[in-house]
Amino acid sequence: MKLTINLIGKQKRYRYAISVRTLVSMTVLSSLLMLISSRSTHLVSEDIARLALAEQWNEKDRVALQALEAKTGAQLVVVVSQLAKLNSQLSQLDLRAGQLAEQLGMNAKDLEAFADNVVSQPVETEIPFKQAFTAARQSIDSRSRQIAMLESLVKGHHIHQQSQLSGRPVESGWLSSYYGMRKDPFSGTPAMHKGLDFAGASGDAVVTTAAGIVTWAGKRYGYGNLVEIEHKDGFITRYGHNQSIDVAVGDVVTKGQTIARMGNTGRSTGAHVHYEVIRNGQPVDPLPFTRQ
């Protein structure tokens, strides 16, 4: 089927015939072109709008990040300053503790060995600031207590008595084994016994025989739970086989202070304290000191 179009003018007459199928095809094609053209323009406009919005967000984030960096930098300066002050305070306490220890005839280097190094670590370490501050304050508190103890010894009227090695390492109990060669209680063969044994009941107080610095407080092979204390003039005392320990490494202890509880730990056959006296690195018979 065809569609005929007639156009009549004053002088001319036009006539054009077109099939209906062709007309429909042209109409559909024109509609598609218009739809595609309008859709593409719409998509481009949306993309431009989204890009502009994203740029605005990025700018806001950049400004916020700069502000955060500035704030963090200021806080970091404060933190570093505070840590430096704590480190300086701890150094002064260490110096004072060393001076007091020397006045008592103790080895000042032993006090320095127990100093907590957390505060002096660089800020770039992975230790959180809060943990660093906590460790620093704990070190300062511990050193302050140590200094107070040393000052009380220095100012006291019985400095010589405090620092002089004498007396028994127990408040109650009896001497059950002497220093020297004896039959080993486990093997039955002769063996050197390098201390004195004071027997008693589990939980009885074990006391120090002179003021000093705790250099060991924990388990050691053969000794069980051991406390070792350094005194003046190169003396060291050891208290072994304890049930529990009441002091820690670095503590300053006074004469007669309870440092542990009698027990049966380590190479032991019953509740007692194994007491040793070492002078300049060599074990000596503690008996003469217990009689002073």
Image: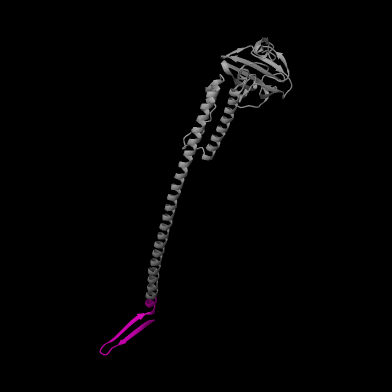
* Horizontal relation, residue 236 to residue 85: left or right: right
Instruction: Give the residue at x 59% y 30%.
Output: 145
* Horizontal relation, residue 17 to residue 94: left or right: left
Q: Is residue 223 magenta?
A: no
| Colour pattern | one colour
Q: Is residue 40 visible?
A: yes
Q: Is residue 22 magenta?
A: yes
State the image quarter where residue 59 is shown: bottom left
* Horizontal relation, residue 151 to residue 10: left or right: right
* Magenta residues, start to end: 1-24
Instruction: Give the residue at x 39% y 68%.
Output: 36
Instruction: Give the residue at x 67% y 17%.
Output: 274
Q: Is residue 265 visible?
A: no
Q: Report x, y in % for residue 201.
A: 74, 22
View extreme (left): residue: 11
Tell me how many marks there are.
Answer: 0
Instruction: Give the residue at x 57% y 18%.
Output: 232
Q: Quadrant of the C terminus?
A: top right
Q: Nearer the viewer, residue 29 or 210?
A: 210
Q: Nearer the viewer, residue 128 or 145?
A: 145
Q: Report x, y in % for residue 127.
A: 51, 37
Q: Nearer the viewer, residue 36 or 169?
A: 169
Q: Report x, y in % for residue 73.
A: 44, 44
196 w.r.t. 247: above or below: above
Q: Quadrant of the N terminus?
A: bottom left
Q: Nearer the viewer, residue 231 or 248?
A: 231
Q: Report x, y in % for residue 225.
A: 65, 23
State the image quarter where residue 5 is shown: bottom left
